[in-house]
């Protein structure tokens, strides 16, 4: 098993990355969702087996078109996989990007894990809610404030709320770094831009789905956080959406994970790492 700290981190044109391990058996790119940080994946990357490189990253700037997010994933593969099997892990909204990569680069992906992904299965309709419309209007006008003092006061509190309501009991993987990052007004503006881009990302993915009815026949795991499902009809809708997302690949499977809220990689890193290892072993069996 690896250490909790990355072997190195760097800022690329497409985002911030933290790298752990060497890509002898596989390279795993772990994509953060809305407001997520690369450091949020440390509980998972420290459980990766020897020979499996973990590349945790945040795509920046926020609000990029889905096609550009896919291009960022391909940059990650070219830079870090070194010819080893390439596995993608996407949390929440990043599940859209992972599926888009699978549909546009079907021969380059060995497998994928969608971690409590946004419930947008094939046939989803983008909804322009009033808050999203307001944020997009501010962004277009260039009037979205980037006030350093406001960010320093509100940003760390926002991060604290994300951890409090997004996990069951686990602490922030790197609270010092997280507080410093969330005190940056540029990061907060990127989060708002990412939120505003959600409907457009769904529309882009639906166009890709129209030309490719299924994802490639690769191991494809969808993990649902049991404690983030809600109840009644809400839970039923979420489970149905996640089951449909698992079905986009002929080898898809769906698992409900107990003891986890939405930040499932923090609450249950063992399950995420286990799903990755299943894919790596499947790759090794095919190559034998």
Image (cartoon, rainbow, N blue to C red):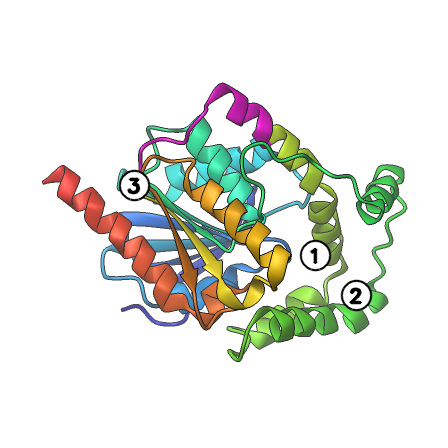
Report the front residue among 239 and 280: 239
Q: Is residue 206 magenta?
A: yes
Report the front residue among 120 and 40: 120
Name the image quarter holding the N terminus.
bottom left
Instruction: Give the CA separation, mark 3 to mark 2.
Output: 39 Å
Q: Quadrant of residue 167?
A: bottom right
Instruction: Give the CA separation, mark 1 to mark 2.
Output: 9 Å
In terms of secondary structure, where does tag 1 sit?
helix
| Place of residue 168 in the rendered image (x, y in percent of width and height, measured from the top left) | 54, 76
| Residue placed under numbered mark 1 in the picture | 187
Q: Is residue 203 magenta?
A: no
Query: Going 58% across and 58% down the picture, which residue do you hit?
Result: 235
Report the front residue among 53 and 274: 274
Does residue 1 appear anywhere in the picture? yes
Q: Residues within 10 Å of mark 2 (few under 14, many from 20)?
A: many
Q: Is residue 163 above or below residue 114?
A: below
| Residue placed under numbered mark 3 in the picture | 82
Report the front residue among 250 and 287: 250
| Residue placed under numbered mark 2 in the picture | 151
Q: Quadrant of residue 81?
A: top left
In terms of secondary structure, where does tag 2 sit?
helix
**For the residues bearing labels 1 and 2, Cβ distance under 8 angstroms:** yes
Residue 237 shown left or right of residue 85 in the figure: right
**For the residues bearing labels 1 and 3, Cβ distance under 8 angstroms:** no
Query: Going 70% across and 53% down the picture, which residue do you hit?
Result: 191
Does residue 24 appear anywhere in the picture? no
Name the image quarter holding the C terminus.
top left
Q: Which mark is residue 240?
A: none
| Place of residue 120 in the rendered image (x, y in percent of width and height, measured from the top left) | 58, 42
The span shown in magenta is 205-218
Q: Earlier in the sequence, mark 1 or mark 2?
A: 2
């Amino acid at each position: 098993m690896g250490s909790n700290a990355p072997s190195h981190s760097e800022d690329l044109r497409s985002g911030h990355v933290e790298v752990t391990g060497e890509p002898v058996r596989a390279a795993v790119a772990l994509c953060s969702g809305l407001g997520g940080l690369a450091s949020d994946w440390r509980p998972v990357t420290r459980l990766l087996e020897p020979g499996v490189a973990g590349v945790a990253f945040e795509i920046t700037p926020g609000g990029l078109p889905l096609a550009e997010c896919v291009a960022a994933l391909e940059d990650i593969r070219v830079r870090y996989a070194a010819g080893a099997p390439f596995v993608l892990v996407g949390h929440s909204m990043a599940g859209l990007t992972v599926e888009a990569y699978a549909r546009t680069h079907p021969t380059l992906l060995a497998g994928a894990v969608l971690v409590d992904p946004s419930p947008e299965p094939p046939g989803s309709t983008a909804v322009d809610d009033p808050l999203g419309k307001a944020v997009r209007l501010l962004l277009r006008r260039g009037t979205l404030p980037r006030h350093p003092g406001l960010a320093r006061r509100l940003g760390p509190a926002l991060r604290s709320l994300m951890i409090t309501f997004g996990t069951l009991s686990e602490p922030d993987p790197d609270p010092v770094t997280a507080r410093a990052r969330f005190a940056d007004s540029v990061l907060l503006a990127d989060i708002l831009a990412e939120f505003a881009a959600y409907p457009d990302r769904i529309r882009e993915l639906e166009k890709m789905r129209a030309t490719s009815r299924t994802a490639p026949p690769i191991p494809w795991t969808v993990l649902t956080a049991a404690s983030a499902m809600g109840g009644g009809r809400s839970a039923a809708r979420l489970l149905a959406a996640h089951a449909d997302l698992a079905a986009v690949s002929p080898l898809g499977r769906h698992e409900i994970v107990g003891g986890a809220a939405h930040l499932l990689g923090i609450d249950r890193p063992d399950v995420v790492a286990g799903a990755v290892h299943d894919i790596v072993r499947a790759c090794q069996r095919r190559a034998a």
